[in-house]
Image (spheres, helix red, strand yellow):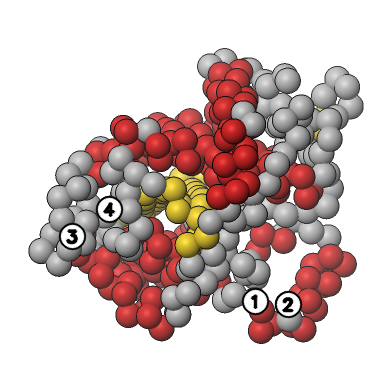
């Protein structure tokens, strides 16, 4: 466990990477994404930040605040609904047109509700997005992995020379990917319906996304082309954000009451942001590896479950499934995924 005071002490060390760090925050206009972006702006030297979200109003507020916090920062907003993979590709093209490298890709976009699988109605009366995916599941997994794969060339540029160390023994480059979800809670999932088209529940969606994220990130980390990039799947704990914005008023009232009663067990959103940036920029987490990180900044291990998922073929099946989804949707301007 690393205490928050120690993290406060260490965060300024991000300046060792030099000026001009570039961070992309998907879900950066609220919650943990906004909080982490704020700490990035606070501590980095002349950083450039891309906030990806849907609220122009929130983006203007954040841009103004960040400019006051660090006048040398450059904060840019790209408005997009990234629950759709073709929109993800469009956002990534906009970033690639402006950048030759990025140092941090931070993925925290998501929603929470009890409506079940949602979107437009398909011919068989199962609700889904126009691309054939559930919106919450798409945000938690497919969209994040699509961002990661699209941004890998720019992360690799930042990682060049990553094995060379500075005089203080710390890596001289920063190249990290962080997905905020449920690290350490991976378990076997239903491989007969990986996209949950027919067996959807809110719990199953979160579980599938958690397990699939870890397995996909482990595969990317093992690729020698990504040897200079550190991959993180984190579990932030119970953080009060506006991820509940799509819950009805009664559910939001209950959640408010719950957090009041159990406030001692909740994690302040600023702490979650600080811990997210600390993990991504801490030289003790080596590149070319996947790191599962808890709400206390401890490195987690779910080795028995992950080993079993690899040995029973689930890892390879999930990878093949994800490739099928990306091929069906992203290679066709009007494509949808049909399992």
Could you give the CA–CA distance between mark 3 and mark 1, rounded to whole angstroms?
A: 34 Å
Q: How far apart are the two marked residues, 2 and 4, measured between alpha carbons?
A: 36 Å
Q: Earlier in the sequence, mark 2 or mark 4?
A: 4
Q: Is mark 1 on a helix, strand or loop?
A: loop
Tell which circle, 4 or 1, labels the residue nearer the N-terminal end.
4
Could you say whether the residue bearing mark 4 is in a helix, strand or loop? loop
Name the image quarter holding residue 204: top right
Marks 4, 3: nearer the viewer: 4
Name the outermost residue toward the left: 167
Tell me which corner region of the image, top left, top right, bottom left or bottom right, holds residue 13: bottom left
Q: What residue is shown with label 2?
A: 259
Mark 1, residue position? 266
Q: Is residue 256 left or right of residue 210?
A: right
Q: Name the residue under label 3.
A: 18
Q: Is 76 left or right of 171, judged from the image as shown?
A: right
Q: Which residue is drawn at 32% across and 53% down?
A: 286
Mark 3 and mark 2: Cα distance apart in space: 40 Å
User: In the rendering, which numbered label is found on residue 174?
Assistant: 4
Q: Nearer the viewer's eye, disc 2 or disc 4? A: 4
Distance from label 2 to label 1 (Cα)? 7 Å
- Camera-nearest residue between 322 and 72: 322
Q: If the image is split into quadrants, where does the C terminus sit?
A: top right
């Amino acid at each position: 466990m690393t205490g928050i005071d120690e993290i406060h002490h260490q965060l300024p060390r991000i300046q060792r990477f030099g000026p001009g760090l570039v961070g992309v925050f998907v879900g950066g206009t609220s919650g943990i994404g906004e909080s982490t972006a704020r700490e990035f702006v606070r501590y980095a030297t002349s950083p450039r930040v891309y906030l990806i979200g849907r609220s122009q109003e929130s983006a203007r507020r954040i841009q103004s605040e960040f400019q006051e916090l660090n006048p040398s920062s450059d904060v840019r907003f790209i408005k997009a609904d990234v629950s759709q993979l073709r929109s993800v590709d469009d956002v990534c093209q906009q970033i690639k047109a402006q950048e030759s490298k990025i140092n941090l890709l931070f993925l925290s976009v998501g929603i929470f509700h009890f409506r079940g699988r949602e979107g437009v109605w398909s011919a068989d009366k199962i609700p889904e997005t126009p691309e054939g995916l559930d919106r919450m599941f798409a945000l938690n997994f497919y969209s994040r992995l699509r961002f990661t794969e699209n941004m890998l060339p720019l992360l690799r540029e930042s990682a060049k020379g990553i094995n060379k160390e500075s005089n203080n023994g710390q890596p001289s480059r920063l190249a990290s990917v962080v997905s905020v979800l449920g690290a350490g809670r991976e378990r076997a999932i239903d491989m007969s319906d990986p996209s949950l088209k027919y067996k959807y529940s809110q719990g199953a969606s979160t579980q599938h996304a958690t397990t699939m994220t870890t397995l996909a990130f482990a595969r990317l980390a093992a690729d020698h082309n990504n040897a200079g990039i550190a991959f993180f799947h984190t579990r932030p704990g119970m953080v009060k954000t506006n991820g509940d914005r799509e819950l009805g008023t009664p559910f939001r009232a209950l959640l408010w009451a719950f957090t009041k009663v159990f406030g001692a067990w909740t994690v302040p959103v600023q702490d979650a942001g600080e811990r997210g940036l600390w993990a991504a920029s801490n030289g003790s987490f080596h590149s070319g590896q996947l790191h599962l990180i808890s709400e206390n900044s401890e490195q987690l291990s779910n080795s028995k479950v992950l080993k079993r998922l690899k040995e029973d073929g689930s890892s390879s099946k999930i990878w093949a499934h994800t490739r099928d989804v990306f091929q069906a949707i992203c290679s066709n301007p009007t494509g949808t995924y049909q399992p």
